[in-house]
Image: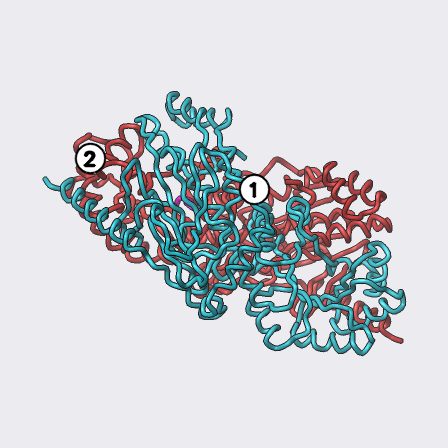
Chain colours: A cyan, B red
Amino acid sequence: MSKALITDLYELNMAASYLQRAMVGPATFSLFVRDLPPSRGFLVAAGLEDCLQYLESFAFEAEDLAWLAQAGYSSEVIEMLGALRFTGDVHAVPEGRIILANEPLLEITAPIAEGQLVETYMLNQITFQTTIATKATRCRLAAGDIELVDFALRRTHGAEAGMAVARVSAIAGFVGSSNVEAARLFGLHPAGTMAHSYIEAFPTEADAFRAFTEDLPGPTTFLVDTYDSLEGVKTAVAVIRDLGLTGTLGVRLDSGNLAQLAQETRRLLDDADLPQVRIFVSGGLDEYDLERFRLDGVPVDAAGIGTHMGVSADAPSLDSAYKLVAYGDRPVLKLSAGKATLPGAKQVWRRSRIDEDILTTRQETGPAGFEPLLVPVMRGGRRVGPPGTIEAARQRLVRDLDRLPGAARDLHVPAAPAVAVSAVLRSLTDDVTAAMRRRIGEATQP
Amino acid sequence: MSKALITDLYELNMAASYLQRAMVGPATFSLFVRDLPPSRGFLVAAGLEDCLQYLESFAFEAEDLAWLAQAGYSSEVIEMLGALRFTGDVHAVPEGRIILANEPLLEITAPIAEGQLVETYMLNQITFQTTIATKATRCRLAAGDIELVDFALRRTHGAEAGMAVARVSAIAGFVGSSNVEAARLFGLHPAGTMAHSYIEAFPTEADAFRAFTEDLPGPTTFLVDTYDSLEGVKTAVAVIRDLGLTGTLGVRLDSGNLAQLAQETRRLLDDADLPQVRIFVSGGLDEYDLERFRLDGVPVDAAGIGTHMGVSADAPSLDSAYKLVAYGDRPVLKLSAGKATLPGAKQVWRRSRIDEDILTTRQETGPAGFEPLLVPVMRGGRRVGPPGTIEAARQRLVRDLDRLPGAARDLHVPAAPAVAVSAVLRSLTDDVTAAMRRRIGEATQP
């Protein structure tokens, strides 16, 4: 897969035009989410690392250029595209921080063709990864003491998506992932038990349990619901006793009324004097199931969270935008119905509570005690500082969650905090809008 | 990214156990969707091509094996994994065919470790691509004479997802894609216009329109809503006249009340004696918007369909399963609450109407006039026949849509046709279930 051609055709057309007419003035593009889905009271920033990797290595390869030639682009344009690298500056909100509607997640200042060509990939990665990081965080908030493991790979939108889901769910506080390649590449704890097929491949469930512990020493979680969940628990108990198993042991419930089965399973295990055997649940779980387990005190120790988290089933995308806000020395905006934008490079300032955020122009200094959310992450096309880690992003999220009002954390009818707009940014918006309307008025005079 | 490690940890654990105890008997796994989402009356099979490519080249690389060693797998297991290739047989429903709940999309017969290791990728690709192909087909059914273009790349779950979305939307009948790399790799028609940023980068909208037509001769679609849609249309008209533009021309509406704006835009264009200038709409559209345009006779010629199609926003996943149905000469099943399966390799038979489908054992011959849906696509790990094309899949879909009852095509409250189960398969299921229950009973006797 080419990298530079993972873009929308119009980016190439616009870039070709800019390059041909030597429009190389610096442009600033701002990436933000217009409105949160009704079920979301906050978002968790993610996707920046993949964006920075993309920008650092952005280049058209020989075969890309050959395709562009046969598609009709002029040799002059193709030569300029061949030489083009990303040389811009990037300010961004670090991964793991909580952000709200209209708060820029990323701002790029670069020669306009460069800023335009990378639009599609920036939107793709940040929209998707922020969507999933937010959903995973909701699951984590709901779960209380229940440990969560990413089980999503089989239902994510492709393998690349599965990798990102494993990574951002770790940022959200999941303790492991079933995705082996993600465990390898990101240093996550690989997690997994056994499938129903394994049980069925042996003459009896007990045979399967015995074989598994023999062949794979170490922590074992017995899948007990292939034929009958509570009979399966009894079989697991018998095998644990027969073989004198010790160490980390568990049973996994994957169907039926999990809350009720967990209660009965706990009783069976405790009656068998096996209080250390953990109960692991899975099967189409989401944050609402987890919340119910927590509120009802269901004795669940850990849960595998798959599809609902991995595709963010109730809100699988965000209303994100990547908008030109300045070109040359001129702040710009669009006035499109319901999609009007604010002009110029920006900053977001945050104090101790997230319902006090202030959106300002980039030049402004925030009030005392406020910290800026956007930080320089790339200068002249090179990263500022080393790549971000999952652990650092996790720490940022933990800190920001502490500052998030309860109403925004509510899973059912959340109230997203409002973001204040500084007087300077408001007056700039008014001025640019007025100037724009004057110009349109003049342009449409006969 | 490794290929063989794009899997769930439990697949590796089970495979290790199977290999260690020389369980190499052929196993048959069946991939199907348990229940359709309530808003779906049918599904469109997709994802097979990527699955076959994966199976053909399945292998653990040196660095995969190194990771497995440090993760604790025995050198014996690692040696066997290193030598392992996919050597199985695959029967599958070709891409583009309509399928229903419980109809296998793909069945693999292979040494059990092989069939197990590939589970995660098979489920991932077929679930995701079938989800999107179905959503895109709903859009295509809704749109009537309106041409559709894939605009989803910026909001798909990653770049790999964007590639698959472009491909399956072409199977559904979309006429082009904004995704340049997909156009290049799959031979699709690349489609695109200009962004608001382009308009804003010039002093006036008219300057931008003129520059674009100068720099990019050929078909042009003017984006008219940056400042005011109808004023934008007038500007486009003036530029078309001033420059004496001919050829394929259009205007794109991207915000506001699109139905109303399209009516007014058509009037402006017709009054300007420009009936050939097409109206292109975009902006958060789904099948319900398209249906309304069609039913209300809104003069829309083409539409860009993005997020809603690209993530299948209302049903972003499917309740898919990949289940062991036979091991050695023994058909198997699971009895889990709400997730019980049917044993043995299967076939689906279809006649002239899709509400007459019959699910049978693989050995049965369907009634006269019925054709089998599952066909051999791989034997001994090698493909049977050349790779499938988008065009062939498109033809299959067109043919199957003709045979789909109106109630299943309904966008609002669809009724998915029922699938009959043959007497032989029903009696096999009863026999295996009874044998299973006997065995469990015996196993749990004291």
Left/right placement of residue A31 relative to residue A166 reads left
Quarter placement of the C terminus of chain B: bottom right
The residue lying at 72 percent from left, 37 percent from top is: B61
- The Cα–Cα distance between marks 2 and 1, rounded to whole angstroms, is 48 Å
Residue underneath mark 1: A387
Is B150 part of what is drawn in magenta? Answer: yes
The reply to whether residue B20 is in sight is yes
Q: Position of residue B337 (x, y in %)?
A: 68, 70
Q: Secondary structure at mark 2?
A: helix
Q: Nearer the viewer, residue A85 or A127?
A: A85
Residue B239: which disc? Answer: 2
Q: Amino acid at mark 2?
A: Val
Q: Position of residue A190 (x, y in %)?
A: 70, 52
Quarter placement of the N terminus of chain B: top right
Q: Secondary structure at mark 1?
A: loop
Q: Position of residue A363 (x, y in %)?
A: 34, 45
Point out the stretch of residues depicted in magenta: B148-152
The reply to whether residue B94 is in sight is no
Q: Position of residue B300 (x, y in %)?
A: 29, 48
Chain ID, mark 1: A
Is A271 part of what is drawn in magenta? Answer: no
- Mark 1: few, some, or many residues within 10 Å (few <14, many ≥20)? few
Q: Amino acid at mark 1?
A: Pro
Q: Nearer the viewer, residue B194 or A185?
A: A185
- From the image, state whether disc 2 or disc 1 is nearer to you: 1
